[in-house]
Image (spheres, helix red, strand yellow):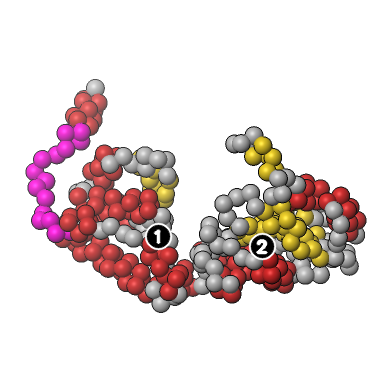
Amino acid sequence: MIGKISIGKSFRGCISYALEDKLDLAKQAMVKDRAELLSFNLCFGDKKELIQQFNEVRYLNPKLSKPVMHITLSLSPGELLDKPTLHKMVEDCAKELGFEKNQYIAVTHKDTGHQHLHIVVNRVGLDGKTLSDSNNYKKIAAYCRKMELKFELKQVLSPRQFLSKEMRNIPRMDKRKEAMKNDIRLTLIQSRNYAEFEHQMKQKGYEVIKGRGIAFRDEKKMYAKGSELGYSLAKIEKILEQTLTQKQALILREIQKENLIKQQSKSVSPSLSKSIEQDRKLDYSKALEILLRTERDYSQTPHELLQKKRKKKQSLHL
């Protein structure tokens, strides 16, 4: 389950969005009866009455410019909960985030391929006190993880900063970043110096951005810092100073360490580890093939580098 929180100014806009029919731009037609009022707290009535009641309470704290809290809870495609379960989920959300004594409505929408609901909360309580919006992302992430376990929903990894220490140690990289990381490894093994390394990375379709550090951008414009991939500029330069045998041993140890961490992650949760396993399947066949190669013949310098050297010599003689 994925949860999102936004803070806004207008109850009219937020409540209207939650309750009104919506125009489907693709079909050029209104989606009728897409919204169903699921539950409400300390308020009642139709859209107009709800907006009026929320605004009356908000003026108990006229200095607050953003009294609206809008929560969206989305289930994974294929998951469907009945109304009593959704009611319980909303009540749990109110307790977890501390708005059980505030005005709120919960509305379920039927206009997408997955079940989701919206909760509109008045941050101003009947006592005039304001509901805090600090650590909202951390709170909603913790709430979603609890609901996944409680109602046996598909488990989703939280943002890294909200994970436990053990979970933060599990590498979480998408396939494109893994491919970039693998190409960096192969190129480090194949290169004698930084000039060759940068040249070969460009040959593979990467843009190499070097400054105080180093970053890479692939053909689809995905950007990643070298430090994010485990290969800072300092580490790259240090590896390039080593012999081929030393490089092979170093990178092989890194691969073995990553595989060990992957194995340890399986003890976290059977369903969660299965999801992690699927998201982080690594293909090291090419890397291992390189690791088994013998020392390269460096007797010849690449044609492009020879041209650069000639141009540099010519400029020095001018």
Range covered by the magenta-colored residues: 291-306
Evaluate whether residue 206 shows in this view. yes
Tell me the residue at 72%/70% (across/down): 91
| Residue type for callout 2 | Asn
SS category of the residue bearing label 1: helix
Q: What crowding class fits label 1: few (fewer than 14 Cα within 10 Å), some (14-19), or many (20 or more)?
A: few
Give the x, y percent position of residue 195: 25, 42
Q: Residue at x 35, y 69 (%)?
A: 262
Residue 301, magenta (yes or no): yes
User: Residue 202 falls in which quadrant of the image?
Assistant: top left
- Residue 125 relative to residue 188: left or right: right
Q: Vertical placement of 166 versus 223: above or below?
A: below
| Residue that protrudes farthest toward the bottom in the picture | 267
Q: Position of 61 compared to 120: left or right?
A: right
In this picture, residue 236 sits left or right of residue 121:
left
Q: Which residue is mark 2?
A: 136
For this orientation, the residue located farthest to the top is 318
Residue 4 visible in rendering: no
Which of pointers 1 and 2 indicates the residue nearer the eye?
1
| Of the pair 162 and 152, the residue shown nearer to us | 152
Marks 1 and 2 sit apart, C-alpha to C-alpha, by: 27 Å
Q: Which residue is mark 1?
A: 279
As drawn, the label of residue 257 is none
Q: Nearer the viewer, residue 87 or 94?
A: 87
Task: Relative to 233, say whether 299 is above or below.
Answer: above
Q: Secondary structure at mark 2?
A: helix
